[in-house]
């Protein structure tokens, strides 16, 4: 079976940098995949796409060595199983509140006897290659998001859930859970909670991940030692580059007009 290289890196204590796909387009996914990200996450929770888009985007990512993950819209076993059957090599599950919910997500990622994933890897077996049914339980990543007040309170029981590979922090929702609102990433309370989550991951031997969204924050999280860090999203990169170049173009046009004397 094809190796889940980011998962292997996390298990060895290493770091990976990923990208976020929020636009339902195969070409965008292929461009992002061939840039060199360790992994890409297709966002079915907040992205402008649907399950049908997975059937185009996952094959597009397969043109590269980048490993595909999917953030499912909710902690529903059928959503997790369908994403995995389509060829995702891991799922990010939002708003996990306690050990029971974490165990539900893990079970949906594992074939019996380790879980209750139903067998039917329609595209996954083709992408994963020979041995998928036998080896998938050890190669598919199950990642829980801790971003609610209950999740923070029950952090240790989530992090110690057997079979869980990582916890991924959504900084904005974490801000809401702390009564700070989104964008409070430098607030001491937010900083302390992020560190607390990272420490819990280390204590229980799983990877710690966090959504970056920009280069400065991604660099900050990498310096802090997070194992999986998101640099940014397809729409963010597109909008950011366009804004920057448009502003420069307008400055050039203004300067040229001024230089004519008219």
Image (cartoon, rainbow, N blue to C red):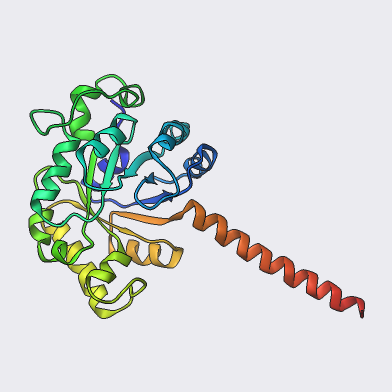
Looking at the picture, how far across and down is residue 140, in whole percent?
A: 24, 36
- Nearer the observer, 225 or 94: 94
Q: Could you say which quadrant of the image residue 172 lies in? A: bottom left
Q: Is residue 24 above or below residue 237?
A: above
Looking at the picture, how far across and down is residue 154, in whole percent?
A: 9, 61
Residue at image point 53% right, 43% down = 28
Residue 12 visible in the current orientation: no
- Nearer the observer, 262 or 209: 262
Indicate the quadrant containing the C terminus: top left, top right, bottom left or bottom right.
bottom right
- Nearer the observer, 82 or 2: 82
Residue 212 visible in the current orientation: yes
Residue at image point 27% right, 39% down = 79
Q: Could you say which quadrant of the image residue 88 lies in? A: top left
Task: Determine whether, in the image, residue 159 is placed left or right of residue 174.
Answer: left
Residue at image point 15% right, 57% down = 97
- Nearer the observer, 40 or 180: 180
Q: Is residue 204 above or below residue 7?
A: below
Looking at the picture, how far across and down is residue 176, in whole percent?
A: 27, 70
Task: Determine whether, in the image, residue 50 is placed left or right of residue 189.
Answer: right
Q: Is residue 249 above or below residue 56?
A: below
Task: Determine whether, in the image, residue 58 is placed left or right of residue 249.
Answer: left
Indicate the quadrant containing the N terminus: top left, top right, bottom left or bottom right.
top left
Residue at image point 24% right, 41% down = 141
Looking at the picture, how far across and down is residue 101, in whole percent?
A: 13, 49
- Report the label total: 0
């Amino acid at each position: 079976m094809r190796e889940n290289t980011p998962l292997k890196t996390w298990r060895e204590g290493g770091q990976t940098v990923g990208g976020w796909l929020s636009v339902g387009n195969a070409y965008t996914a292929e461009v992002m995949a061939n840039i060199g990200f360790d992994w890409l996450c297709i966002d079915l929770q907040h992205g402008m796409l649907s399950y049908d888009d997975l059937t185009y985007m996952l094959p597009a990512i397969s043109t590269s060595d980048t490993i595909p993950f999917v953030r499912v819209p909710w902690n529903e076993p059928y959503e997790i199983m369908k994403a995995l059957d389509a060829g995702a090599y891991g799922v990010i599950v939002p708003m996990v509140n306690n050990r029971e919910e974490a165990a539900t997500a893990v079970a949906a990622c594992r074939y019996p006897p380790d879980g209750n994933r139903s067998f039917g890897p329609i595209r996954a077996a083709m992408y994963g290659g020979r041995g998928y049914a036998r080896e998938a339980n050890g190669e598919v990543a199950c990642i829980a998001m801790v971003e609610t007040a209950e999740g923070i309170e029950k952090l240790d029981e989530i992090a110690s859930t057997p079979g869980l590979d990582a916890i991924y922090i959504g900084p904005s929702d974490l801000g809401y859970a702390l009564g700070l609102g989104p964008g409070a990433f430098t607030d001491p309370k937010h900083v302390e909670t992020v560190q607390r989550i990272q420490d819990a991951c280390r204590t229980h031997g799983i990877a710690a991940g966090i959504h970056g969204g920009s280069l400065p924050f991604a660099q900050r999280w990498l310096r802090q030692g997070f194992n999986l860090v998101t640099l940014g999203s397809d729409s963010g990169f597109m909008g950011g580059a366009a804004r920057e170049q448009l502003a420069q173009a307008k400055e050039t046009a203004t300067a040229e007009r001024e230089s004519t004397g008219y």
